Image (cartoon, grey):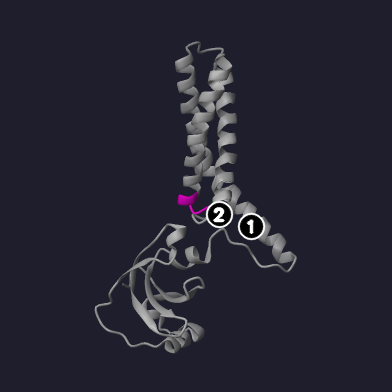
Amino acid sequence: MKDMVNIIIGMIASGALGYINYSSLVSKGLISSFEDSSDKHSTIVIYSIIDLAIYLFINACISNWIKSPILNISISIASSFVVLYLFMKFLSPIIYKKLLAKTNNYRNNNELSSQSIFTPREQAFEKDCNMKVYIYDFSGNLINYGWLKGVSESILLDHEILLSPNGEKETISESELQDIMNTQSYNPSDGIEDTNIYIDLKNKIKYYIIYYSLEEV
């Protein structure tokens, strides 16, 4: 009966820790926040199983010294949390990066394109810099432009962004932006670090993004 109680409590605790592990991986930029729901659940289940194994191992190790069931369970959960925290902080980033590097090395050797853990949307908008965005439809009509202030985190709202007005009206055409990006004819002294074009095929929208260094804007 005691072992069954430990397993049940361990499953509950590991389920919660599995979700925390997943959230930690997303916050550290090790996996995409736009993972398919089945992939997300698989990741949580895998980490929950690892969490449960660690909990049961620690519980079995201390059960001979600590006879109080409540104290035993409390210490097992706390110790599991500490072990997982250290694992997620120090080992997970190394493991994920090495696995991705080995995967891409194998693919490159077989003349295949490299894989990224992030979606094109994340690669376009989630950068540590100031971004100026010009939005056009597929007919080349300017929809709006301004400084990027926020991007929706929900995969169901992947076309929603928050812009801050420039404070002045611009008349730059899509072809002019394409020339700037194709030839990189911008002046580095203006603080421009890079440019990208993100194409939303679902909503038929093109985002021309100019990245500025934080110091220059």
In whole angstroms, how far apart are the C-alphas of marks 1 and 2? Answer: 22 Å
Q: Extreme top residue here?
A: 67
Whether residue 27 is in magenta: the answer is yes
Mark 1 falls on what kind of element?
helix
Q: Earlier in the sequence, mark 1 or mark 2?
A: 2
Q: Main secondary structure of the magenta part?
A: loop
**Over which residues does the magenta segment extend?**
26-30
- Residue 41 figure quarter: top right
Q: Where is residue 188 drawn, in percent x and y?
A: 41, 80
Which of 212/133 is in front? Answer: 133
Mark 2 falls on what kind of element?
loop
Q: Extreme left residue here?
A: 167
Q: How many marks?
A: 2
Which of 126/191 is in front? Answer: 126
Q: Residue at x 34, y 78 (%)?
A: 144
Q: Residue at x 56, y 12 (%)?
A: 64
Q: Residue at x 48, y 51 (%)?
A: 26
In the rendered image, the vertical position of residue 208 relative to residue 22, given as above or below: below
Q: Residue at x 51, y 45 (%)?
A: 22
Which of 198/193 is in front? Answer: 198
Residue tagged 1 = 101
Q: Residues within 10 Å of mark 2 (few under 14, many from 20)?
A: few
Q: Extreme right residue here?
A: 110
Whether residue 169 is in magenta: the answer is no
Residue tagged 2 = 36
Q: Where is residue 166 drawn, in percent x and y?
A: 28, 77
Q: Is residue 141 left or right of residue 64?
A: left
In the rendered image, the vertical position of residue 213 relative to residue 37, given as above or below: below
Q: Nearer the viewer, mark 1 or mark 2?
A: 2
